[in-house]
Amino acid sequence: MHQHSIEASLISSSLIGRRVLIPRIKLAPSDPNLPFTLERTQSSVRLSYAMTINKSQGQTLEKVGLFLP
């Protein structure tokens, strides 16, 4: 993690291995009448796990997602 972004490597598509930066996004309320300054910073990432078909054989899983590019 950098101070203003997250560095990641792509693991799918034709750009496998390419390094990308995911910027942090600053959000502020649009109401100028608030008596205080409010600023929220967030990164648009989602926690995920991956497992190959070979490793998953013989396991019982409650939920499974499938990514088909």
Image (spheres, rainbow, N blue to C red):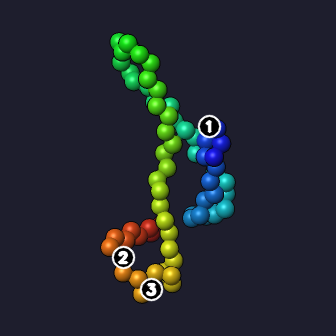
User: 11 or 35: nearer the eye?
Assistant: 35
Question: Which quarter of the figure has residue 62?
Answer: bottom left
Q: Earlier in the sequence, mark 3 or mark 1?
A: 1
Instruction: Answer with left or right where residue 14 lies relative to residue 54.
Output: right
The residue identified by callout 1 is: 4
Q: Amino acid at mark 2?
A: Leu
Task: Tell me residue 6's x, y (percent).
Answer: 61, 46
Above or below residue 9? Residue 34 is above
Query: What element does badge 1 sit on?
Result: loop
Above or below residue 32? Residue 52 is below
Q: Amino acid at mark 3?
A: Gln
Task: Tell me residue 66's x, y (percent).
Answer: 41, 70
Residues packed near mark 1 inside 10 Å, few (<14), some (14 to 19) or many (20 plus): few
Residue in the image at 46% along x and 81% along y = 56
Above or below residue 64? Residue 33 is above
The residue identified by callout 3 is: 57
Query: What element does badge 3 sit on?
Result: loop
| Labels in figure, total | 3
Instruction: Answer with left or right where residue 10 lies relative to residue 30.
Output: right
Q: Amino acid at mark 1?
A: His
The residue identified by callout 2 is: 61
